[in-house]
Amino acid sequence: MMKDVINNQIKIPVEWHTSIHKIGQKFDSVAEVRLALQYYSIVKRFKNFSIMSIKNFYSTHTCGQHGANAGHSRASRKFIASQIQYILKVKPDLRPIDIKNDLFSHYSIKINYCKAWQRKERAQQELFSDDDEAYDSLRWYEAMVQATNPGSRVATDANDGRFRRLFIGYNVCIKGFIAGCRPLLFLDGTFLKDRYRGKLLSITRCDGNQRIFPLAYCVCDQENEANWKWFLQ
């Protein structure tokens, strides 16, 4: 409807002329304010900038309840997530209980363990993208590896379209092993600290300078004989 109005295909509704009409006019949400401004700017033919400024400020507040818990309802998921994002950059294993305790000690904000876990999930998604999206991008990643590093080996194992495990061996690492490493492989596995709690299996070796040189790695659900066999084969 908005596009039709701008293109003069239909008549502008009368209520758009009064979407902004008096001082002290109240709205239920920020989204409602923005929509009203959009209507009004189209009717009055002026450009609506995204900059907002404070015209009046009263330091003495008479609205709402004041008390020990006042303001807690404003501590939204987005607000709390923004407070812990910079910590997650350097400490990705931050526990929900630490978030819960820090919010109370620093801001006197009380939340339960479940909410602390949810806020961490949101912060991680904004920082590192969503885990589900990452798994969905594996086919694209496989194609990009083959395009940028021909000769690499990438294999994805799925069960009815559901991800099971992934093998990656870059061609540059394979050539490096053949050219400059002793014929000795080291196998190891470790935990992945994401939502799905998978495992990372790796095959490394020592180069001529006694440094660790990666050959291949595998992402799977658990470290067991079946996954190790699939990885090595």
Image (spheres, rainbow, N blue to C red):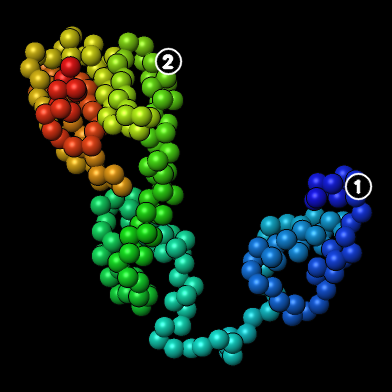
* Residue at mark 2: 147
The residue at 9%/14% (across/down) is: 182
x, y (%) of residue 29?
64, 69
Indicate the amino acid at tag 2: Ala
Cα distance in 3D space between marks 1 and 2: 49 Å
Query: What residue occupies the far front of the structure in this picture?
Result: 160
Residue placed most toward the observer, 59 or 96: 96
Quick one: label 1, few (<14), some, or many (20+) residues within 10 Å? few
Q: Where is residue 25 in the image (x, y as percent from the top left)?
A: 75, 77
| Residue 30, percent from left and from top | 64, 66
Q: Earlier in the sequence, mark 1 or mark 2?
A: 1
Circle 1 residue: 8
Q: In the drawing, does residue 161 fall left or right of residue 6?
A: left
Closer to the eye: label 1 or 2: 1
Q: Looking at the rendering, in which quadrant would you find the C terminus?
A: top left
Above or below, comparing residue 24 to residue 174 in the picture: below
Q: In which quarter of the image is residue 201?
A: top left
Residue 61 located left or right of residue 229:
right
In x, y percent, where is residue 56? 68, 79
Q: The residue under label 1 is which amino acid type?
A: Asn
